[in-house]
Structures are given as C-alpha cells and as structure tokens.
Amino acid sequence: AERLVKAGGYLSFSGGVARRPKWETRLVEIASRVPIERILVESDAPDQALPRERLIPGTQSQDTSSPADIPDLVEAMAHALGMPSEELGEITANNAKRVFDFSHH
C-alpha cells in the first residue's frame, strides 16, 4: 500500500473488505500507513456486497452490491477507524473528486 501511495496512487475499499475475518483490524493497520487523503470507497457493483449485518438499518439487504451501498460502507469503515462517518464520507468524496476530476462533463 505504501509503494502505491508513493507512486501517486490511491487505495480503494469495497464492501468485500467487511466480509474478511478481522477486517476492522486490517483496515486500521492499513489506514495507519496510508494518508486518509489517499483512500477511496467503491461499490464494485454487482460484486463485493457488504455483509447484511453491516447495512444501515432500514436500507435494502441484498446479495449484490450497488452504488447505493457506499454510505453503509463508509459508516462501517468510519466505525472501525473511530471517526464520524460524515467526516470520512466528506474526505473520500473529495478524494474521488481529485482522482476523477468531475468538473469535465
């Protein structure tokens, strides 16, 4: 991960990360070595769905992933990192804007 960042890259997480054993510990370990300004989130739709227990109550439970699951992923990651989900959501949204330059329609 550090070599990727040194080369100017970003590290992206999808819902599948929350399906792995001890994923929260691994996420915290990676995030401690990668600047948060280099972290992205993605749905990886239709693969890599979040486990049902990680979905925000009231949202749809499904076996496939969708871009609508990104807030659930951000909330799960923010919880693991010990930070507000709104803050992580804003940071990762700004990171995506830098990477993809949405100003060009």
Image (tube, grey):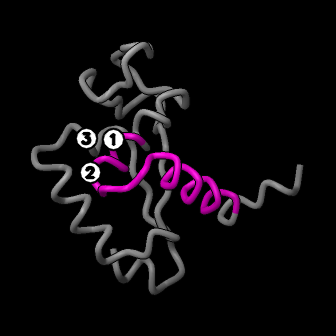
Question: How many residues crowd mark 3 within 10 Å: few (<14), some (14–19), many (20+)?
Answer: many
Q: Dot 3 lies on which element?
A: helix
User: Horizontally, is 47 left or right of 27 in the view?
Assistant: right
Q: In the rendered structure, which amino acid carries the disc numbered 3?
A: Ala
**The N terminus lies in quadrant:** bottom left
User: Horizontally, is 38 left or right of 55 in the view?
Assistant: right
Residue that appears at 62% across and 57% down: 96
The magenta stretch spans residue 76: yes
Label 1 belongs to which residue? Answer: 76
Q: Nearer the viewer, mark 2 or mark 3?
A: 2
Calculate the distance from the C-alpha at mark 1 to the C-alpha at mark 3: 8 Å
The magenta stretch spans residue 72: no
Q: Can you say whether 3 is above or below 79 in the image?
A: below
Q: Main secondary structure of the magenta part?
A: helix
Residue at the far bottom in the pictured view: 6
Q: Dot 1 lies on which element?
A: helix
- Count of numbered circles on the image: 3
Q: Nearer the viewer, mark 1 or mark 3?
A: 1
Q: Which mark is residue 35?
A: none
Label 3 belongs to which residue? Answer: 18
Q: Can you say whether 20 is above or below 63 in the image?
A: below
Q: Can you say whether 44 is above or below 13 in the image?
A: above
Q: In the rendered structure, which amino acid carries the disc numbered 2?
A: Ala
Q: In the rendered structure, which amino acid carries the disc numbered 1?
A: Ala
Question: How many residues crowd mark 1 within 10 Å: few (<14), some (14–19), many (20+)?
Answer: many
Residue that appears at 51% across and 54% down: 87
Q: Dot 2 lies on which element?
A: helix
Label 2 belongs to which residue? Answer: 80
Q: Are marks 1 and 3 in contact (CB under 8 Å)?
A: yes
Calculate the distance from the C-alpha at mark 1 to the C-alpha at mark 2: 6 Å
Whichever of labels 1 and 3 marks the residue nearer the N terminus, that label is 3
Q: Which residues are magenta?
A: 75-97
